[in-house]
Amino acid sequence: MPTTSTDGHRTEATCVVVGGGPAGMMLGLLLARAGIAVTVLEKHGDFLRDFRGDTVHPSTLTLLDELGLGERFAELPQRRVDAARVLVDQGMARIGDLRRIPGRHGHIALVPQWDFLNLVKDAAQEEPTFELRMRTEVVGVIRAGGRVRGVRYRDESGEGELRADLVVACDGRSSTVRDSVGLRPREFGVPMDVLWFRLSRRESDQAGLLARFRPGEGLVLIDRGEYSQCGYLIPKGTEARLRAGGIEKFQTRIARLVPTLADRVTEIASFDDVSALLVRLDRLRRWHVPGLLCIGDAAHAMSPVGGVGINLAVQDAVATARIIEPGLSRSTLNSRDLARVSRRRRIPAVIIQAAQRLVHRALFRRIDLENTAPVEPRSGRLPLPLRVLNRIPILQAIPATLVGIGPLPEHAPPFARRPPSRSGRPTPD
């Protein structure tokens, strides 16, 4: 049994998960359902961060069904998208049809990430071996006998230590835990950053996901119902110049890309309404050291292309729980078990990152930031790949499956499955 201090918090646990994002919360839930004493440490006081990835893909929807949480998830306010479209100078084209992929979920659910995380948290807190500690920032690891034995943290009461058989780093692309053990990711060149903002929607607006690309820039519109979450893709390193040009020039750039937005770009009153995401694409060569494992963004930071980051992180957590559960339950976990996790989850990370790099090279070249003249429509046919996808609609299942399910989907292990119920608990006989 885990030991606790006078304030009721654990001083020892079987597993400590650092980071309360999708990977961390899902791993905490799965291990708790196996009866393992797991503590999740999250440095923030809540999950309310704007412009986080909010796309829940079919692979994750299927997982929620397997966990008995599908009905509860369906009750969350959400928009459903069953197709992706791209707008180019020659016109509009559909590039992916999620209705054609296998399984019962032929759509992507657009749900605020904090709602998704709170759902997982509520289910996890029904398990007696789960502990979540908010406002608890990990500042380093405890080492002894040539391995990691726990973490050092700082909370509202001061500094403390939490010892564990295993530490799992789920603390994102700037992982403190990863850095503290000297693991360094291999960086891949990324030609873009993203500026996020909101614009109101009109009934005449395109529903679902719409992307508008031109050489060196792009605009992604995500349907949130009353508003669109907008991501303006810019060449890396040009954010300061865009901001220096003033908000009116920025508004003009958005309107020239998608003229139907011209009547509302003034809703971006200042750059205070714009949030920057500095895009990184990297991957660890080695995901573990004795006593510590990295997963999710801590192991492989993804580009926003395809919106797959959340779902890859969740699948990392599922594979991790399935592989390490026997060793944690029997106190026999070793580095070979951790290596099995990285070998399995490296495969989809490599495939998706390779696809993202191809998209980067195809779409991004330098642009003239001073040019805000209207974009003149081009006559002629759509580019060949778009023509093929639209003439042979069944081919749209290929990009839809790669994005919606992924190259190596994971399923809930038997110990974590529950029959459907709104509480997440087994339905009484």
Image: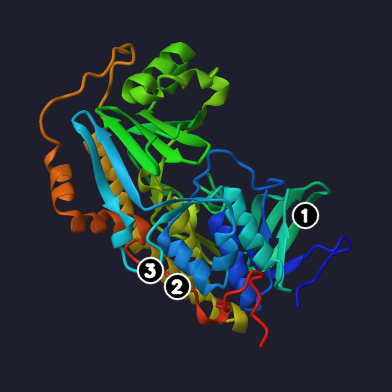
Task: Report, in whole angstroms, how far the alpha carbon at label 3 lies from the one at label 2.
Answer: 13 Å
Closest to the camera, between mark 1 and mark 3, is 3
Q: Amino acid at mark 2?
A: His
**In the rendered structure, which disc, 1 or 3, sits on the residue that comes first in sequence?**
1
Quadrant where the image shows the N terminus: bottom right
Amino acid bearing label 1? Gly
Q: Which residue is mark 1?
A: 160
Residue with the most extreme front position:
203
Question: Which label's residue is closer to the chain start, 3 or 2?
Answer: 3
Judge the density around disc 3: few (<14), some (14-19), many (≥20) Cα neighbours within 10 Å.
some
Q: Does residue 365 appear left or right of residue 170 in this picture?
A: left
Residue, far right: 6
Q: Secondary structure at mark 3?
A: helix
Query: Label 3: which residue?
Result: 344
CA neighbours of label 1 inside 10 A, class few (<14), some (14 to 19), many (20+)? some
Kind of residue sitting beneath label 3? Arg
Q: Position of residue 160 (x, y in %)?
A: 77, 54
The answer to which quarter of the image holds residue 33 is: bottom right
